[in-house]
Amino acid sequence: MKKIVLGAVLILFITIGFGVYYVLSNLDDIVKAAIETYGSEATQTAVRVESVKLELQDGSGAVYGLTVGSPQGY
């Protein structure tokens, strides 16, 4: 019984580790998609981003090629 619980905890930690690795390795694409999706909803126009570069170790980030369409009436 103890081996089964230990095995389940080990599998849980490995799964969480792979999940964290996946999110961190794809963070630039996740942020880019979020900017385009929620930016378009907030402004009611097309919002596009060429690329996003995040440096977590430096605490910095950059958004390249940000394009926001003109809202209606402007």
Image (cartoon, helix red, strand yellow):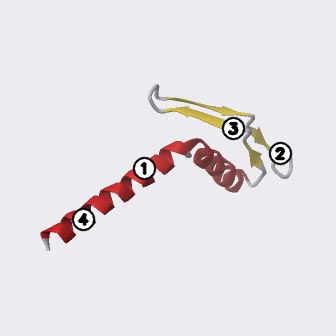
In primary-sequence order, the first of circles 2 and 1 is 1
Neighbor class of circle 3 (other Cα within 10 Å; few <14, some 14-19, many 20+) is: some
Tell which tag, 4 or 2, sits nearer the viewer.
4
Which amino acid, by three-letter code, is at mark 3? Answer: Ser
Residue farthest toward the right in the current orientation of the protein:
73
Asked if the residue under mark 2 is in contact with the one under mark 3, i.e. CB atoms within 8 Å, the reply is no
Q: Secondary structure at mark 2?
A: loop
In primary-sequence order, the first of circles 3 and 1 is 1
Disc 4 to disc 3, how far (Cα)? 41 Å
Asked if the residue under mark 1 is in contact with the one under mark 4, i.e. CB atoms within 8 Å, the reply is no
Which amino acid, by three-letter code, is at mark 1? Answer: Val
Q: Secondary structure at mark 1?
A: helix
- The residue where tag 4 is placed is 7
Q: Quadrant of the N terminus?
A: bottom left
- The residue where tag 3 is placed is 51
Disc 2 to disc 1, how far (Cα)? 37 Å
Residue farthest toward the front in the current orientation of the protein:
3
- Image coordinates for residue 74, horizontal then vertical, percent: 86, 45
**31 relative to 3 in the view: left or right:** right
Which amino acid, by three-letter code, is at mark 4? Answer: Gly
Residue farthest toward the top in the current orientation of the protein:
58
Mark seen at residue 20: 1
In primary-sequence order, the first of circles 4 and 2 is 4
**71 relative to 53 in the view: left or right:** right
Q: Write the residue at 43% across / 53% down.
A: 18
